Image (tube, rainbow, N blue to C red):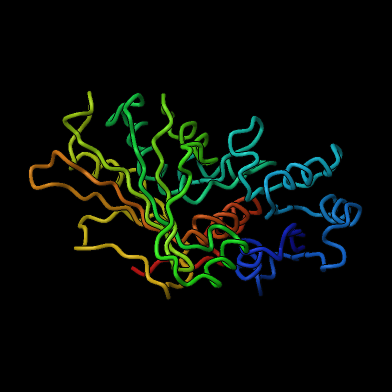
Amino acid sequence: MATRVFIDGAAGTTGLEIHERLAGRDAFDVVVLDDAMRKDAAARADALNGADIAILCLPDDAAREAVALVEESSATRIIDASSAHRTANGWTYGFPELVGRRSVASAARVSNPGCYPTGFLALLAPLIRARLLPADAPYSVNAVSGFSGGGNAMIDRYDSDRGISFRTYALDLSHKHLPEMQQQAGLEFPPVFAPAVVPAYRGMLVEVPLSLPAIQNSTSADAIVGALKDFYAETALVRVHETVPPELVIRRDDTANDGLDLYVARSPDGTQVRLIATLDNLGKGASGAVVQSLNLMTGQPETDGLRLPDN
């Protein structure tokens, strides 16, 4: 019997991409509400409680409201693509490579990682766990994303204002992704986070620069590469590259990709390192991650329906 999946917020960017990844898969019976019903609380409650798995592609407050509509007696499991529950008790963080596939597979409540934290945590969390880098160092994150990460409002803005070539934001240093970055990496202090948007629809580059001699009890660039390769050796979606190309770019015509690529650039003497992750903010950074968790939660092959990176 097919798993009944309700996508709440299917008209948004994330919901549409999830629907594309599930199209044609007999394992799932996908339910969406039409425009006349999707804001009707009773209709949403019926759909939520009638689903085997509900996927929430909603703003944070609406996601909390949706969870409240699920009755205690309901067997509905939830994947929340918003940031509402990423540090909440009782929710499993939906990053199988970090928290373990079994944890996601058995979870009743899964909170999808943020797109920027996906790159940051993929780079730093394994190194903190291995004690190759200290948890109390003052880390920073420089990142750029395609404008689709801002949802329909941001997409409309970039479509209407072709003069924007670079947009840095979160200048109050209180971006909503910071709590999950700190918690999931096990950091004593939140990183200094400098996000930006460029005029490309999709794509993302996340960088953590390191001056190794300035970090007490740090390690070498070679050890970092080795640790990352060992950590992700059994994963299908994360690749750790032995070499770094002359440049890493986000292209305006990039296609959907659910993989995650990690690089360790270094100075000639090895004292300075740039940890870099590249990913599709709508793929492993959003919809692809949802489908990966959905596959695990329903006993399907982990990568079914996903756009795998080229080898």
Residue located 59% across and 55% down the image: 290
Residue 75 percent location from the top left of the image: 80, 44
- Residue at the far left: name it: 269
Position of 40 relative to 272 (above/below)? below
Instruction: Between residue 117 and residue 226, name the one nearer to us.
Output: 117
The count of marks equals: 0
Horizontal side of residue 10 vs 224, given as left or right: right
Residue 190 percent location from the top left of the image: 43, 31
Position of 11 relative to 296 (above/below)? below
Residue 99 percent location from the top left of the image: 50, 39
Instruction: Identify the image quadrant of the C terminus.
Output: bottom left
Horizontal side of residue 102 vs 24, given as left or right: left
Instruction: Between residue 150 and residue 32, name the one nearer to us.
Output: 150
Residue located 52% across and 65% down the image: 306
Residue located 51% across and 70% down the image: 161
Position of 35 relative to 48 (above/below)? below
Instruction: Between residue 247 and residue 224, name the one nearer to us.
Output: 247
Residue located 46% across and 49% down the image: 169
Horizontal side of residue 124 vs 82, given as left or right: left
